[in-house]
Amino acid sequence: MPMFDRRNIRRIYLNITGKAKDFLLSDKSREFFVFLFFFFIAGGFWLLQTLNNDYEAEFSIPVRLRGVPNNTMITSEPVSELHIKVKDKGTVLLNYMLGKSFYPVSLDFSDYKAVDNHVRIYASQFEKKVLSQLNVSTRLLSMKPDTLEYIYATGMSKLVPVRLSGTVGAGRQYYLSDTIFKPDSVLAYAPEEVLDTITAAYTQPVKQENVSDTLRQQVSLLARRGVKFVPASIEMILPVDIYTEKTVEVPLHGVNFPADKVLRAFPSKVQVTFQVGLSRFREITADDFHINVSYEELLRLGSDKYTVKLRNIPDGVKQVRFNPEQVDFLIEQISPSL
């Protein structure tokens, strides 16, 4: 017989609930709940009394530099955070801790004058931006650092193309049909001696493998010391296509033959089979392939068989093969027309 059948479980349940009911209705339970009530009341008064005392606390406030002109490069950034020490009642400090974060101290580039491209902003110039976020009862004891500073350089600009940095590998039977950047060029700002060395703006390294669908993503440009690219990021589109096979018939053409000679090939046309992206299947035709046989090349062969080859392969075409791979030929003498 199982140790816990339905009757055993029901009996245990009724036993436990009965004891709990007896306890709740007993004098001991009433004493226990009265104790708990006064315990929480006392704890609440203690907490209120404690939070009503003055305390010191430290907080961090973000710093942001805005409105930097396009032809200006910040070579030494200001600190990213201000560390402040404040004093107030515990209830106020608790509100700072549990409430929303402090707003950034925003520094507008045009508001401050530089000496030799070095800007120093003293506490008296940004203290109001801190105090405006504090309660009127809160005392600001200290700010670190008490001086915000940054160094910048100005430069000339030129338009440079965007280039892909990294590798993208297509999956089996797929291929990368293009690399598209929007925009495809960006402005590079730098001192003249540096600007002359810049030929392109490269993306952050991209690594993708076994891609079988078109990729579209926002990519940051690779940072370069003393150079500023505008915009600093671009949209990258990598269209992926699937390979399919196609066969066309292409004639052989003799080139550089004397006026009284002509090429006779057997057969005169060969089948060219190749792989091409599905999106370009209709676009690629026999007219895109040229099998040109030069007179000088045939004279050097010392044979009456010519191995078929293409001078140029159209873009997007791969795995080209011929049927037949060799053709018989003869150079026929023709009578000059009267």
Image (cartoon, grey):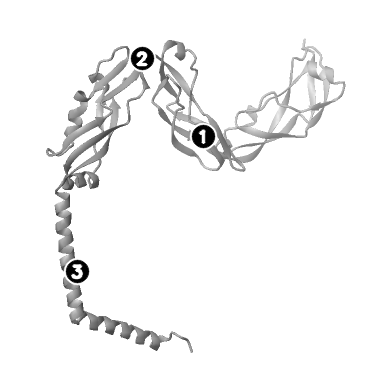
Q: Amino acid at mark 2?
A: Thr
Tag 1 near tag 3, CB within 8 Å: no
Residue 165 visible in the displayed image: yes
Instruction: Using residue 137 as the reference point, say whether residue 72 is left or right of it.
Output: right
Mark on residue 206?
Answer: 1
Instruction: Using residue 168 as the reference point, say whether residue 275 is left or right of it.
Output: right
Label 1 vs label 3, nearer the camera: 3
Q: Position of residue 336 (x, y in %)?
A: 79, 11
Q: CA distance from mark 2 to mark 1?
A: 30 Å
Specify which label sits upstream in the sequence, 1 or 3: 3
Residue 13 picture quarter: bottom left
Q: Residues within 10 Å of mark 2 (few under 14, many from 20)?
A: some
Label 2 vs label 1, nearer the camera: 2
Specify which label sits upstream in the sequence, 2 or 3: 3
Q: For mark 2, give the secondary structure.
A: strand
Residue 332 visible in the displayed image: no
Q: Is residue 84 above or below residue 311?
A: below
Q: Is residue 81 above or below residue 153?
A: below
- For the residue pair 81 and 295, the one nearer the viewer reads as 81
Q: Residues within 10 Å of mark 1 (few under 14, many from 20)?
A: few
Mark on residue 154?
Answer: 2
Q: Amino acid at mark 1?
A: Val
Q: CA distance from mark 1 to mark 3?
A: 63 Å
Residue drawn at (84%, 18%) of the image: 300
Q: Read off the residue under disc 3.
A: 36
Q: Amino acid at mark 3?
A: Leu
Label 2 vs label 3, nearer the camera: 3
Q: For mark 3, give the secondary structure.
A: helix
Q: Position of residue 216 (x, y in %)?
A: 46, 37
Residue 144 picture quarter: top left
